[in-house]
Amino acid sequence: MSNFAHPDFPVDGLLRRAARRDPDGIAIRTATRSVGFAELDAWADRIAAYLDQELGGAAGARVGVAGVLDPVFAAAYYGTARSGATVVLVNPLVGEDGLRHVLGTARVEVALVPAATAGLLAKLRAELPALRAVVVTDAADGVVPAGTVPLHEALAGAPARPTGTPPADPGAVACVQFTTGTTGRPKGVLLTHRNIVANAKQIALAHRLDTGSVTLNHLPLYHVMHLNSGLYAGACQVLCQDPDPVASLAVAAEAGATHYYGLPARLHALAHDGRLAGAVHPGPQLTAVLSGGSALAPQTATTLRERLGVPVIQGYGMAELSPLTHCQQPDRYRPGMVGGVVPGTECRLVDLTTRRPVDVWSTGEVQVRGPQVMAGYLDGGHETRIDADGWFSTGDVGYLDDDGALRLVDRLADVFKHDNEIVAPSRVEQVIREDPRVADCIVADWPDAEHGALVWAGIILADGAAAGSGFPDDALPGLGILDVLDSITNRANEHLAAFEQIRFAEAIDAVPRTPTGKPERRSVRTQLRHRAAA
């Protein structure tokens, strides 16, 4: 770890450096526009000038920036950092309660958000006393909610920034990123400029990005890990705003994408889409499909690998880690693993009870150490889980192999015990999803006085699964839903240990997920406890 070096400048230095190296190069492309590095840098300057004026140059003031999949997010993100303010990342897909929590907890003073989010904030202004200005980022026609201002008007009224304005301290907090809240109320994670710049280099190296790379982001939001690593490498970033996974392949082909970024839920949908066989191939320049955010089913990875002819790999990290710590390599691909550590990072596993390090192949809690480990939580309101030696306890359970590659078992908060044996819901879900009659599923624990807990599975049936679909164990056409569920459960239980056996299964219409695609098991568990008690 001590040999890993990275630039020691503020986050916006990533953009400044890229603009100086290749001013006319394309930084970000969408279906309707392209923005060059120098143009994006100048745009960030103008936003910084507006914030200087609005905030009076108050270093560390907090500015909410919505992570829309659009170049305006990059300009607002780097412009805020350049002004000396702290970026508070805002998920525009959350509702009023989520916005109230994020903007209120962080005491956001200025919000740069799309019109839809601005409309929700208009209802909450009385509950957000720190919020002094809402700037609408997608109001080209000037039509905005009352009490807000279009971005172009805000920038037009701001004077130019004085030359020689000192940059932010690389050790200062640059960004507040809230956790997904799968195990509790979302927490604000404090990331320094140094955390983020270090991780930008780590990701660029792990993903093998350079100036010739073209990244296709098929994501619902613009994630800062892709933004920062792309800028570090000087790559061209293509934003696919069409949620259709098959359409994204055509966009990748047209753009000449070398890297395809997607969420597990979207990749799962793509792998099971009947149009995949006839879809446009992204082209020979594509080197990998990369997944993150939650576990990718090995069968999904195998299906896409066979169809696209490139490795389908995943990484591992979290908001507290800026976010990446592990990543598979295309030439060392193994289904189900999340790979070795990114440069400059250490990883170890500790026993869940004794907290002592365990040997390879032994299950324990994942701990990591490196320059990307967060500075702490917002207002110090939570345990940081960082010990005196700098090891961060992730709350995830897994094991390491002889090569140092990590395999995750599940979240520490999600695993449960059946007769004192640890059941990992994600492991059971992977087995269930191998059945072609299953479109998606979620597993949780059903309370049981004798065994501690029993395995419950909520299953979304694939189209035709209960209508004589010709699957091998369909004895007769037109099986009822309960019969199909029994058949799916029996098939899965053949591949599960005794303590993992599915005891309850029912058909559901949707799997509750966070905006980033992670299964929201906490709400399911709460419902099951109420039902079991009744």
Image (cartoon, grey):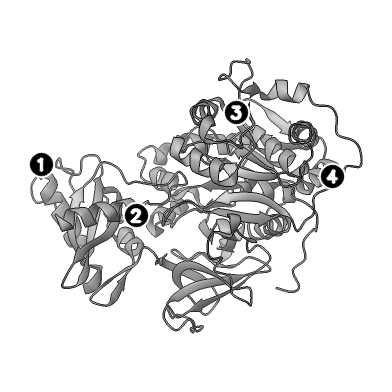
Q: Which residue carries the number 4 mark? A: 21
Q: Quadrant of residue 82?
A: top right
Q: Earlier in the sequence, mark 2 or mark 1?
A: 1
Q: Nearer the viewer, mark 2 or mark 1?
A: 2
Lower position in the chain sequence, tag 2 or tag 3: 3
- What's under tag 3, amino acid-wise? Ala
Considering only vertical position in the picture, is 88 above or below 120?
A: below
Q: Residues within 10 Å of mark 3 (few under 14, many from 20)?
A: few
Mark 4 / mark 3, whichever is N-terminal: 4
Estimate the spatial distance between the alpha carbons at disc 1 and disc 4, rounded to whole Å. 64 Å
Q: In whole angstroms, how far apart are the C-alphas of marks 1 and 3?
A: 45 Å
Residue wearing tag 1: 478
Quarter residue 343 falls in? bottom right
From the image, tell me which residue sits under label 3.
31
Say above or below: 59 vs 380: above
Note whether residue 483 is visible: yes
> Which residue does the numbered mark 2 point to in the structure image?
522
In the structure shown, which secondary structural element does the residue marked by tag 2 occupy?
helix
| Front in this rendered view, residue 195 or 341 | 195
Look at the numbered discs 4 and 3 and tell me whether their residues touch, using CB distance below 8 Å. Answer: no
- Would you say residue 285 is visible in this rendering? no
Q: Nearer the viewer, mark 4 or mark 2?
A: 2
Tell me which amino acid carries mark 4: Arg
Q: Secondary structure at mark 3?
A: loop
Answer few, some or many: residues within 10 Å of disc 1's Cα (few below 14, many 20 plus, some between 14 and 19): some
| Residue situated in front as seen by the camera: 504 or 330 | 504
Looking at the rendered structure, the kind of residue marked 1 is Gly
Question: Between disc 4 and disc 2, whose residue precedes?
Answer: 4
Nearest-to-viewer mark from 1 and 4: 4
Mark 4 secondary-structure assignment: helix
- Tell me which numbered mark, 1 or 4, is placed earlier along the sequence: 4
